[in-house]
Amino acid sequence: MKATNTQTIENPRSAVHNPQLTVALAGNPNAGKTTLFNALTGLRQKVANFSGVTVERKEGNWKVGDEDIKLIDLPGLYSLDATSLDEQIAREVLMGRLADLPKPDAIIAVVDATNLERNLYLVTQLLEYGIPVVIALTMVDLAEKQNLEIDTKKLSKLLKIPVIEIKAKQKTGINELAGKVLESAKSIEKPKTNWIANGNGFHEANKEDIHLSLTDNQAANKQIFARYAFISEVYQKSVKPVDESEAKFSEKIDRILTHKFFGLVILVAILLLVFQTILVSFLRCNLFKLFLFIKKL
Ligand SMILES: Nc1nc2c(ncn2[C@@H]2O[C@H](COP(=O)(O)OP(=O)(O)OP(=O)(O)O)[C@@H](O)[C@H]2O)c(=O)[nH]1
Ligand SMILES: [Mg+2]
């Protein structure tokens, strides 16, 4: 599918006098973007389509201190390779090519903590847009249940960007996220690290690297390989392996409880126990009343 009718006019923020800061929320499908978007904007949001296409455009006002930030909820993306309409639109937004939308001053990369490796692929691409990125780590509650221990400080150090744990439902981490996003979006020197993926890996770029990435025939494959190698290293350094024995024990319990036969037997046993408890307390109470009644006679 192609974004045939999308207006693609170069519209960098510097060329338009727009004092309002613009921040884009980007992340894999189901990473928790809209949940976070709703928590940040409340009811101050509007929904339309991107010009000429049927991709939903969700915008809202995020009040951070005196700033009224324009927040854009991008469609769910696995990459920015522009192979789908959603990816094409996201790229246009990040490059500031939409006529009615300034280039974002910062990106909030919404990363699902339970699928860190897969989600980081998009992050490596977002890092190459020359826009400050702040990671909002979602699904932390689920990661905790899975005994996944993510060292966010280490992750932040390796990626050279802030990483904030968010519990959107409990609204924790929101203030810290607001502070980091505002600081990054207002930063004059942005971003400090220019990342690039090429035959030399995924790393900080210099002039030679940019030249390499443009001339290499197998650039696309090398870029993908470089990203995965980098992600694997980051993952190994920042995530503590799950305690296998503990995981196996809970897996065993799950297997028994969801077993076709034993699961049913356990359910019936629990129901009988509950029924028996109710029956016994009912009889005890009423037999006593009956005894008092007979005694009165
Ligand atoms: N347990 C838990 N669930 C969450 C959290 N954040 C979001 N969810 C749930 O995850 C599901 C997906 O969340 P959305 O906010 O719709 O995800 P999204 O990234 O906007 O999804 P797409 O727009 O389809 O790409 C919803 O059922 C949310 O309630 C979280 O921190 N913890
Ligand atoms: Mg959504």
Image (tube, grey):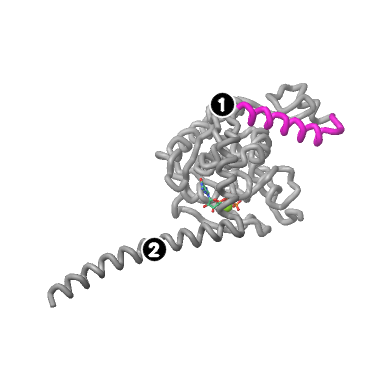
In the image shown, does 111 or 215 lie closer to the viewer? Answer: 111
> Where does residue 242 sit, x and y in percent of width and height?
59, 34
Q: In which quadrant is the N terminus drawn?
A: bottom right
> Where does residue 294 sit, x and y in percent of width and height?
17, 75
How many C-alpha atoms fall within 10 Å of the one at disc 2: few (<14), some, or many (≥20)? few
Residue drawn at (55%, 53%) of the image: 257
Residue drawn at (20%, 70%) of the image: 291
Q: Is residue 229 magenta?
A: yes
Residue drawn at (15%, 73%) of the image: 295
Q: Earlier in the sequence, mark 2 or mark 1?
A: 1
Q: What amino acid type is highlighted by mark number 1?
A: Lys
Q: CA distance from mark 2 to mark 1?
A: 54 Å
Q: What amino acid type is highlighted by mark number 2?
A: Gln
Residue drawn at (68%, 45%) of the image: 78
Q: What segment is highlighted magenta in the picture? A: 216-237
In the image shown, does 76 or 113 lie closer to the viewer? Answer: 113
Queried on whether the Cβ of the residue with tag 1 lies below 8 angstroms from ligand 1, the answer reads no
In the image shown, does 117 or 187 lie closer to the viewer? Answer: 117
How many C-alpha atoms fall within 10 Å of the one at disc 1: few (<14), some, or many (≥20)? some
In the image, taking residue 187 as reference, residue 207 lies left or right, namely: right
From this viewpoint, is residue 17 visible? no
Q: Is residue 121 magenta?
A: no
**Image mark for residue 276:** 2
Residue 58 lies, with reference to residue 275, above or below; the image says above
**Residue on which disc 1 sits:** 154
Q: In which quadrant is the C terminus drawn?
A: bottom left
> Where does residue 287 sit, x and y in percent of width and height?
25, 69
**Which SS does the magenta portion mostly show?**
helix
Q: Nearer the viewer, mark 2 or mark 1?
A: 2
In the image shown, does 98 or 91 lie closer to the viewer? Answer: 91
From this viewpoint, is residue 180 visible? yes
State the image quarter where residue 228 is shown: top right
